[in-house]
């Protein structure tokens, strides 16, 4: 009697093996793609988090010292005395460039110098790893030299130009080319970055969009348009910019403030309920107002509108005279020095 084996006792056919291998290959390829995507996203997040924390540390340093730190040496090896330490505690303008620390060719806006080096992580009390990005290239830190000294620090005198992919200025307040500093990750390709060990510098790829971030001048490119292709659009850098911001950032719309200015600043409009420049001073002070026919005495007084005391409006005083004079002087222009503060009230728009 012939024996018929149970179907479950038979091995896989070649077709079945092929199907299993195909499905396994698809699953493996999918898993590999997801893993690579996860790793890439992790690298980007790590780099951006470090940039953000460096930026915060620089702002804290400014608030404590009245200046930004100088760059550190780009070629200082880890665990050496100069690693992550600013080149001078007395301001960059007191010392010549350190090894592999650059003064931007031609200077920045207004001829002011820009120093380019490494992030001074130890001066900022940051972990040593924060000297580099997730791809192993050291961050570039460029700082307007005068802002790294307490006696020359001026928030409106940044000198670094930052443009977008089309060449348009990113920083425009108070003018183009006024960024205080930039921190730049040279991206996955490390073009222009110093190695993590500080032993050498990766080549700066010529003729690409990101070349501007490694040519050691005072102009940089910041864009969200990313391209890893080997062409003129190549750009995989990540950059943080600090510049003077327009007055009123963080102030809610509709807020009213007084300014010692002749016109409201950008983002503000004249406050209609306080027409003209308002006089704040002693009640009852007497002044001479110069007229063609001679001096005329004017007494400043506070009037009450409802329950609110309002100072006399300067525009009202000026309606019938030409010049407001101090009470003891003649009706001449050089005596126009009244002891009050004239403020312009503006509303945040």
Image: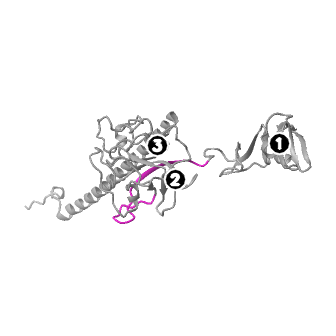
Q: Tell me if label 1 and label 3 are in contact, CB under 8 Å.
A: no
Residue pictured at 89% horizontal, 51% vertical: 292
User: Residue 12: x, y in percent?
Assistant: 17, 59
Whether residue 211 is situated above or below residue 326 in the rendered picture: below
* Separation of residues labelled 3 and 2 (CA atoms): 25 Å
Which mark sits nearer the N-terminus, 2 or 1?
A: 2
**In this orientation, which residue lies closer to the viewer: 175 or 249?**
175
- The rendered magenta stretch, by its main secondary structure, is classed as loop
For mark 2, what is the residue?
110
Is residue 246 in view from this perspective? Answer: yes
Could you say whether the residue bearing mark 1 is in a helix, strand or loop? strand
Is residue 306 in view from this perspective? Answer: no
**In this orientation, which residue lies closer to the viewer: 59 or 4?**
59
**In this orientation, which residue lies closer to the viewer: 88 or 239?**
88
Query: What span is colored magenta in the figure?
Result: 224-246
Q: Is residue 236 magenta?
A: yes
Could you say whether the residue bearing mark 3 is in a helix, strand or loop? helix
Q: Tell me if label 3 and label 2 are in contact, CB under 8 Å.
A: no
For mark 1, what is the residue?
325
Quadrant of the rendered structure where residue 189 is? bottom left
């Amino acid at each position: 009697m012939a024996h018929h084996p149970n179907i479950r006792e038979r091995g896989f056919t070649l077709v079945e093996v092929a199907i299993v291998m195909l499905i396994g290959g698809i699953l493996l390829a999918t898993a590999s793609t997801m893993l690579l995507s996860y790793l890439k996203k992790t690298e980007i997040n790590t780099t951006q988090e470090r940039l953000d924390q460096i930026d915060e540390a620089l702002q804290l340093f400014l608030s404590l010292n009245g200046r930004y730190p100088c760059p550190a040496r780009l070629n200082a090896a880890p665990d050496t005395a100069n690693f992550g330490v600013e080149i001078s505690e007395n301001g960059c303008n007191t010392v010549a460039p350190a090894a592999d620390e650059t003064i931007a060719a031609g200077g920045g806006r207004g001829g002011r110098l820009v120093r380019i080096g490494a992030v001074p992580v130890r001066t900022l009390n940051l972990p040593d790893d924060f000297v580099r990005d997730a791809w192993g290239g050291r961050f570039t830190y460029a700082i307007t030299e005068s802002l790294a000294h307490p006696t020359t620090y001026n928030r409106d005198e940044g000198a670094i130009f930052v443009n977008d992919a089309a060449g348009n200025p990113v920083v425009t307040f108070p003018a183009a080319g006024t960024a205080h500093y930039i921190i730049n990750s040279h991206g996955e390709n490390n073009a222009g970055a110093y190695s993590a060990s500080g032993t050498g510098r990766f080549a700066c790829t010529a003729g690409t969009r990101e070349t501007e971030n490694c040519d050691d001048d005072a102009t940089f490119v910041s864009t969200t348009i990313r391209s890893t292709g080997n062409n003129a659009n190549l750009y995989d850098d990540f950059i943080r910019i600090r510049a003077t911001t327009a007055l009123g950032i963080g102030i809610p719309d509709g807020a009213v403030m007084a300014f010692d200015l002749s016109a409201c600043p950008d983002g503000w409009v004249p406050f209609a309920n306080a027409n003209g420049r308002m006089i704040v001073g002693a009640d009852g002070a007497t002044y001479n107002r110069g007229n063609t026919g001679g001096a005329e005495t004017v007494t400043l007084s506070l009037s009450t509108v409802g329950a609110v005391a309002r100072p006399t409006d300067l525009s009202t005083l000026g309606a019938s005279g030409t010049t407001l004079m101090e009470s003891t002087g003649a009706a001449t222009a050089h005596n126009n020095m009244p002891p009050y503060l004239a403020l312009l009230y503006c509303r945040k728009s």
